[in-house]
Image: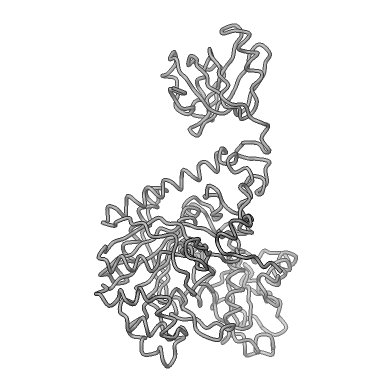
Amino acid sequence: MYRTHSNGELRLENVGQEVTLAGWVQKTRDKGFMIWVDLRDRYGITQLIFDADRTSKEMVEEAKTLGREFVIQVKGEVIERVSKNKNIPTGEIEILVKELTILNKSKVPPFTIEDETDGGDELRMQYRYLDIRRNPVKNNLIFRSKIAIETRKYLSDEGFIEVETPVLIKSTPEGARDFVVPSRMNEGQFYALPQSPQTFKQLLMVGGLDKYFQIVKCFRDEDLRADRQPEFTQIDCEMAFVEQEDILNTFEGLTRYLLKEVNGVEVDKFPRMTYEEAMKKYGNDKPDIRFGMEFGELNEVAQHKEFGVFNNAELVVGIAVPGAASYTRKEIDKLIEWVKRPQVGALGMVYAKYNEDGTFKSSVDKFYDQEDLAKWAEVTGAKPGDLICVLSGVADKVRTQLSALRMELAERLGLRKPNEFAPLWVVDFPLLEWDEETNRYHAMHHPFTSPKPEDLHLLDTDPGKVRANAYDMVLNGNEIGGGSIRIHDKNTQALMFDHLGFTPEQAKEQFGFLMNAFEYGAPPHGGLAFGLDRLVAILGGQETIRDFIAFPKNNSGRDIMIDAPSKIDDEQLKELCLKLDLK
């Protein structure tokens, strides 16, 4: 037996016991005739004492050879510490070591294995197995495990069945690019890794398993934006004989359960907001509603003067920033420079200070009087002491720009508190979106999403106005899950494929198996998938998913620890009937 106890469990009541511990050397303190060693495992730290007067000089000399991260085993007696450490649970005891075994020596680590380390991101990813020994990473992985366990518990209690679906599947043209896998046994043919188990979970509904779930790996070969991974994990769910309300209620329940069981937080309200309302009030479809700063559209109160910038704009829109009227001109100039960055793309920003005395001071006082600015305050909901920030331009672009500004200001003002949770359902998304490059409509979610029955007649005349029977769960300004009621009959699915530009032959080639299944009594069904990585990060009070993944990839999609992706040799290429052309 390597250990009788972990390094986090011994207390004063264990004094006098003979114990065996094992773990990693955190640090040593050498007083010559006496050595103290902090021994660490994933459960905590226990202090060891090597005392020449109570054990042997040889033992003390051997303890002096111990370096950081040596793996050791000790046997000894639990004794009460003279100088107690109230900062750790084991701080009232220590182990008087009688036997020491060095199980494995360690090189000097490339960074310190401490909560606050001197290692940068790339270095720690290269030595991720060392990084995992650090409490922040270790605790994040334990936290992720707890959420996965509680998710399984909740869904199982709700009658869901966990079913694994294939990882080697057929490549389809919709969505992001697929990762493809050559088949040695089928020359010139390829599998794809699933972007989601979408068609399989629909087939499970046809198969009569009316409540399915899976915690599943998914893959997308897309250019990585900030905080994305090429492989990610979904809590994937599907239900048969349900309407949208059934699904929303079920997964509201799961979210409430996780918040309570994992975070100890009770959430009463799950407000619902249409996509159109979210875009109008917040400029994006995943608004953070922990704070205000709703958009105020100012066209009616700002386009009646001789200010051409506003008069020529499709939309003039502003927000009231709480307490920011005290900003200096230098601070406001920096804010203007921030919105003019290429990442945001605004041409400038107009501002108006709503002073505590009820007067206004703006950057456009030449064009607008106090009465005009009072109307701006009314529309944006500004109060004395607030700063009104106004952008103008093409409606879609200016909403996106103001949304970015709203989030940046909330971050600066400390309004995005990680221990507050504000969930939201966004519903009634557009079914289709126009793509300028391909000059055709694409499915906003995927081609199996059902249109709202009352909008079906618009598919031929005004497809852009057709709403989807789709919904997203938003938490603290992040989309943590989304889904839809699916199309479950062959004719509607064929109509959808037609509007997405598929010929009947292409639709049959790509999705014939699903179309055929719909001819054998497919039930009405729908579902939802939570992004587990994002959900765990937000519940953990953070927004970086990489910190909650055991072995993440960097922003180039590389695993720098194992050096992947990597080349394969010519013999493998020949076996797979592949030839590289890298010109």
Total numbered labels placed on residues in the image: 0
Q: Residue furthest right?
A: 330
Quadrant in which residue 304 is drawn? bottom right
- From the viewer's perspective, is residue 311 above or below residue 255? below
Q: Does residue 15 appear left or right of residue 357 in this picture? A: left
Q: Quadrant of residue 529?
A: bottom left
From the viewer's perspective, is residue 286 above or below residue 38? below
In this picture, residue 474 sits left or right of residue 372 = left
Q: Position of residue 206 (x, y in %)?
A: 28, 69
Residue 466, position as x, y percentages in the image? 41, 84
Q: Quadrant of the N terminus?
A: top left
x, y (%) of residue 514? 35, 74
Q: Give residue 537's position: percent from left, percent from top.
A: 50, 53
Q: Is residue 583 above or below residue 311?
A: above
Closest to the observer, 260 or 292: 260
Q: Residue at x 69, y 88 (%)?
A: 308
Q: Find residue 229 and report its image quarter.
A: bottom right
Seen from the viewer's position, the closer of residues 142 and 569 is 569
Residue that extends furthest to the bottom in the rendered view of this protein: 461
Which residue is depicted at the point 67% across and 69% down? 343
Of the pair 81 and 181, the residue shown nearer to us: 181
Q: Quadrant of the C terminus?
A: bottom right
Look at the image and name its color scheme: one colour
The one nearer the camera, 115 or 372, is 115
Looking at the image, residue 69 sits to the left or right of residue 247; the answer is right
